[in-house]
Structure formats: structure tokens, C-alpha cells
Image (cartoon, helix red, strand yellow):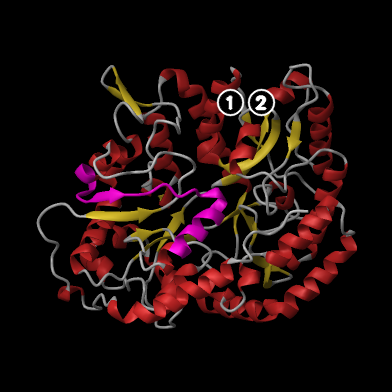
Amino acid sequence: MVIHKLRGLAAICALVMIVLSGCSGSADAPSDPSAVEPAAEGVIDLEVWGTNDGYRPIEKGSRLYELYKKTLGVGIISPYVEWNGGTTYQNRLNLKIAAGEMPDLFLPWQGIESNLAKNGAIADLTELLPAYAPNVWQGISKDVWDVVKANDPTGQGRIYYIPIVMDYGRYAAMVRKDWLEVLGLSMPTTQEAYVQVLEAFRDQDPNGNGQQDEIPTGGRQEVRWMDHLFAMYGVAMIEGYPDWDLYDGKLTYSAVTPNMKAALAFLSKLHQEGLLDKESLLNDKLQWDGKVQGDRVGSYYHWLEQTHLYLDNLYKNTGVKGDFSVMPVPEVPGYQGFYSKKKVGNPQWVVKNNKDRTRLMATLKLLNNLYDKRNWQSLYLGVEGMHYTLKDGRAIRLPDDKRTQENLLLHPWQELATLDFTTKLLKGAASEDRLWSVDQTIRNMEQAQIYSKNIAGDGLPASIYADFPDINNRTLYVEYATKIILGQYPISKFEEFVEKWYASGGGEVTRRAREWYEKVQ
């Protein structure tokens, strides 16, 4: 049985709030930006936390530190904090904040920014961004800022975070097209055809190694990263997190809909028939990625712009040049399927409400230079000899190597993302011998837009879950979904889950979500 690992976060967050409530008054960034003194001469080092999937940390004086200092005008130090789907990162961040050592700039997770804003621990950016980080302010459209203001947990219409903004669908299911060709199969477009493909992957040795070691499809612990199996039933979901969309004309949490019940019944059937990785509910990111990149997985779900990384590692690990192609959302009678898309994504950055105004100004300087598109090529390429090399005067990205490469922490082209710009970055830095994988990535990004749909909960703030951490952490959902998929619960137990969800705060959360939806409409 998979045990949900986030139960202890409520206690940690309570500790964080106790610490913050005692010190929030001392961190008093002024609401009038003109009252902030200019940064002192010289380079200031800032501590920045974001995602890291196994790369080396950024230390003072390191090669990436020097590149960031030269490009952005500030020094950036970023210790290694394992991401692990956000779970380990959130634990470490909460402990860091509780110890009174909040990073200067960091990616918040699971709605922590709401309590931090209420306690005055993060800076009010409403006047600071236009004055001192105009590239951020002007780079994000007014309609997005209006959503951010509507999400202010203090109710004052202020800006406390910088959001991810995506103008294209980032996610889709991918299928090993080369396996389909080996087996003489077509790309599936219906659920029935998809199941037949999964059965063939299971039984007919498409990787050709003489062993029955293929995994038709699967995902990761806490019922994550298998969104494609829910998408065909019209379940709004982002990276395994059920989301909000219109069902019967009302904004509703997708986890408690009949669509979800049908999807869970389907996953249970796949598990029973050996078509779903038997370790799907145990895999962490490293384990699942290892299977995909080990020539064992026929169908997986992830970010489209990282297709080439999976293909490159597959080739490095096995010598196989695979073909992961976008799978159309399989048609299921009675349902309208789609891959979920959001324009206004999760908060990407919050700024420490630093009483040291020199550090505050340095953080704003970092943000302004980070969102200056003239710097993006340099930030994308990274360090010469570590992340890229020069060949015939042209910068070429080197293969992914977590043992030797420092973490390219800053990637604004993904946080203020357009399909055209991302395509140009990928194509412009690809070597001749890696064009095959980059071309697949660009092809997939373009094709997936046909099947992507912007969900109605786009921009919905995590503050709707205030006082209901178990709902925010999906505790009840993960428990019931896991047991239904594994066959420990019959599908009839789904109604019990729905009843418990509404009784444990889901009714109030739904009221808040619908109230927000009416406001932003």
C-alpha cells in the first residue's frame, strides 16, 4: 500500500507560521518604491531556490556562479535541494523558513505563498516591479496580473508572486512510434485501439531483447504523471494533480466527478491486466525516468519540451534512437477528452520581504535582468565546456550530464513561454548529431496543441484550500485512488470518497472556487 508522505507538512507549516508571525514585522519592504535605496556598489550574492533534478549545486565562485554574475549583475548561490516531484523540496523549504533562513528568491510550492504573504514574510511587489523590474512587469500581460491580484490572500488586490505564463499546451502522452512500426501497428486514436497497443507492447517484445520486460505505460507515486489515462475521460489534471473545470456548467474539482470514477475504473483494469507498470504507485522520478530511458516503456506522459532529453538519455543508455510521438487523446464514447492546459500557471517566484534593502534591490535587479530577453540565449546555453561547446563558431548544447553539470536554475523562457521562442532556442543550439531528438521535440510541441484545452480553473489560487491542508495535499484522493487502482477497493467506494471529500472541507473549497470564478470572469 502506498502511504501518502505529505501528512506531516501541516505540522511543519504550523511551525513555519509560528516563526513568521514572530518576525514578520521586522521585514518591512516599503510600499513606496521610491523609498528603497539603490543597491550598493559591487556584486551582492543572493540565495535562490528552485527545481533541481540531480545536478550539481551553484556555489560561490563556481563556473555557473560566474556566468550568472556576469549576465545578471548579481551572484547566485543555490544549494542542492532534491526536487522529487516537489515533496522533498517543500519539506526542506519549510524547515529553512522555520529556521529564519528564508532564501532571497524562491519557487513557492503547494500554496505556501498565501500564508507567507499574510504574515508579511514575502515582499509586496505591486509597486516594486514597475519601478525596479520593468522587464517582468511589461513582459506579463495585464489580464494575467489581474488574476494574480484577484488571488491576493490579503484581499487587497496586491501582487505577491510572479506566475508562470504559458501560451501553449506543455503536456501530452507520447508513444514509442518505432515500437508501433516494429509490431505493424498504427497510432491509436480510440481507447480500444490504445489498449490493443498496450497489450502488444506487453506481449510481443517490441524492444527486441528477447525478454518480456516491456512496460506498456505507467507513472509515478501518488498517482502522478499518468494524466493521459485520465485525459481521455475529460478529467482536468496537471501533473497528477486533479484540477478544476466546468462539469455540468459549474466549476468543479475533477477528482469528485463521474469522469474521475470512470477513469479510475479504467486504470484499475489496466493494472489488473498487467498493462500498467506494477510499480507505478511506488516510482519516484528517478526510477520512472530510468525505465523510460532504459528502452522499457511504450507510453509515458510529460513535458513536451523535454522529449529530446529523454531520447538522448535513451540513446546514451541503450544505443537505441527511439521515436516518442504525441498520441492523440484516445476517444471514449460519452466523454470529451483533452490534455489540460493553463495560461496562468503556478507561482514561479516570490521575494523575501527583506529588511536589508540593499539585498531587496539586488533581488529586483536579478528579476529585471532575468526577464530581459536579450539574456535568454546566454542563460539557455549555460557554461562553455560544461553545458555547451563551440563548433565552427556555433554554440552547441552538450548532452545532459548530471554528474558534471551545475544546475541551470534560471530558465525564464519556460516561465514566460511561447512556442516560437522555445522552438528557436532548441533548434539554435542543437548539434548535427542531436538534431534527430530536437526535431522530434519541436514536432511534438506543435502537434500536441491540437489536443490541448485551457481549463476553467486557470489561475485559481491555492488560497482556496486555506484551513484544509489535506485537500490541498490530495490526501484523501491519493488514498482512495491508490486503493481503487490496486484493486484493494471496488470502484463502488468512489461515492464514499466523494462524500468524505465534501464533508472534510470540499464543500467550502468548492464555494470559494466558484466565487473566485465568478469574480475573474
Quarter of the image for residue 253 reads bottom right
Q: Secondary structure at mark 1?
A: helix
Of 253 and 216, nearer the camera is 216
Crowding around mark 2 (Cα neighbors within 10 Å: few <14, some 14 to 19, many 20+) is many
Q: Is residue 446 above or below residue 184?
A: below
Magenta region: 69-95
Which residue in the structure is indicated by mark 2? Answer: 295
Depth check: give the residue in front, 170 or 217.
Answer: 217
Q: What residue is shown at x 29% (from left), y 75% (from top)?
A: 27
- Answer with mark 2 or mark 1, whichever residue precedes in sequence: 2
In the rendered image, residue 504, in percent from the top left (x then y), is placed at: 71, 78
Badge 1: residue crowd in 10 Å (few <14, some 14–19, many ≥20): many
Q: Which residue is mark 1?
A: 314
Q: Alpha carbon of mark 2 to alpha carbon of mark 1: how far?
A: 6 Å
Is 76 left or right of 195, judged from the image as shown? Answer: left
Residue sitting farthest toward the front: 99
Is residue 508 depicted above or below 268 in this figure?
below
Question: Horizontal and vertical percent for residue 104?
Answer: 31, 61
